[in-house]
Amino acid sequence: MRIYLDNNATTIVDPKVKELMDPFFSQMYGNPNSLHSFGTETHPAIRHAIDSMYSAINANDNDDIVVTSCATESINWVLKSIFFEHGFNSNKKHIITTTVEHPAVNAACKYLEKFGAKVTYLPINEQGIITVNQVAEAITEETLLVSIMWANNETGMIFPIDEVSKVCKEKGVLFHSDGVQAVGKIALDLSKTEIDFLSFSAHKFHGPKGVGGLYIKNGRSLEPLFHGGEHMGGMRSGTLNVPGIVGMGEAMRLANESLEYEGSTVRRLRDKLEDSILELPDVFVVGDRENRTPNTILVSIRGVEGEAMLWDLSKQGIAASTGSACASEDLEANPVLLAIGADIELAHTAIRLSLSRFTTEEEIDFTAKVFKDSVERLRKISSSYA
């Protein structure tokens, strides 16, 4: 049996998505910017896909959704363009983010610090989130932008984004949220928030890799990151990835339709696995499960190195991770566990298990047994567990 429980890293492309994409590789393959029929015949599918994206996050007609290559591009576009356009030559050089953002956010902030940006990295509390008051107290007259993830990629913890967006609006500060781990897992209604920018990536919700998006409230002007054409209304140069756009639109539509299933069946399977793991002594799961995305568990097992546990599970055909796939080659202690106050030893024992709507009961039952057996075996040979 091969079991995939690393869905916060990437997901299987839904077969319905793949089926809808297939004709645009070798049948309707024209450049959408071409005036002949090979190009224009792609337009209805592109419009339908983008309409599906608007519906999935309940964006308004006067908002923009710009297709990008991934959320990392979207994030870099927002942070760098806002800073260089509005902060570089002004006194508004202050950016607020958190210590547990995806590397795309924190690395971009570190880069901007070289050009004079003053960045505040808010610490998380013992539940693995920040509070609205932290953001409000950090904002100054020099604050230009706040960038805070909607849901954490390692813990699944959901941040108070609606409330934070309102504070930013009241104080006249732009607000960006990394929505990569939220889209397709929890209901998003951007018509009721004050979010200025939202980044997302198709491969996190059963769409194809290599395509993502940036939501821009009220069609706000944003200096392009790429230059060289008038694609996407001049906001993002580069020939449109028609199969990717079609796939992302359908994936968002299907994910939105599956939200009830995510909140009931996927959550039930996640809780079943988590309850089984918590029967073991000296284990620790990060965060209140009611304020987590319904598919995610981040667990630490005292006396068991995360990498050793990962390999043990892999030998049994189970794919999991020790944290963010974008930092998986870094074998340092888990930064989220350190941030909530765990000791160094415990922070080296993190394992992330993330389910999807394709995860089955049989897979969870098998994983629960293998997990317990692996912990027992590894603890017997552990020099740090007595």
Image: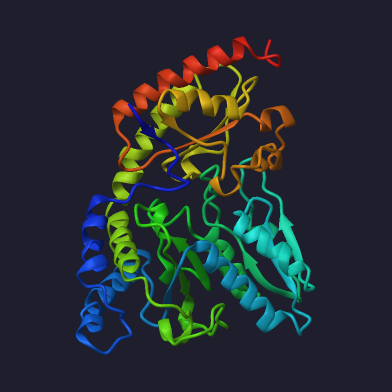
For this rendering, which residue is in front, 351 or 210? 210
**190 relative to 35 in the view: left or right:** right
**228 relative to 142 in the view: left or right:** left
Residue 225, placed above or below residue 257: below
Residue 77 seen in this snapshot: yes
For this rendering, which residue is in front, 294 or 136? 294
Q: What is the basis of the colouring in this image?
A: rainbow
- Identified at 61% across, 68% down, the residue is 167
Q: Position of residue 281 (x, y in %)?
A: 57, 16
Q: Position of residue 56 (x, y in %)?
A: 34, 64
Q: Position of residue 200 (x, y in %)?
A: 46, 62
Residue 136 seen in this snapshot: no
How many numbered circles does the render carry?
Answer: 0
Name the quarter where the C terminus is drawn.
top right
Res. 29 image quadrant:
bottom left
- Identified at 52% across, 52% down, the residue is 151
Q: Position of residue 218 (x, y in %)?
A: 46, 81
- Identified at 36% across, 22% down, the residue is 366
Residue, far bottom: 35
- Identified at 77% across, 67% down, the residue is 113
Res. 346 image quadrant:
top right
For this rendering, which residue is in front, 112 or 293? 112
Residue 149, placed above or below residue 340: below
Res. 6 image quadrant:
top left
Name the quarter where the N terminus is drawn.
top left
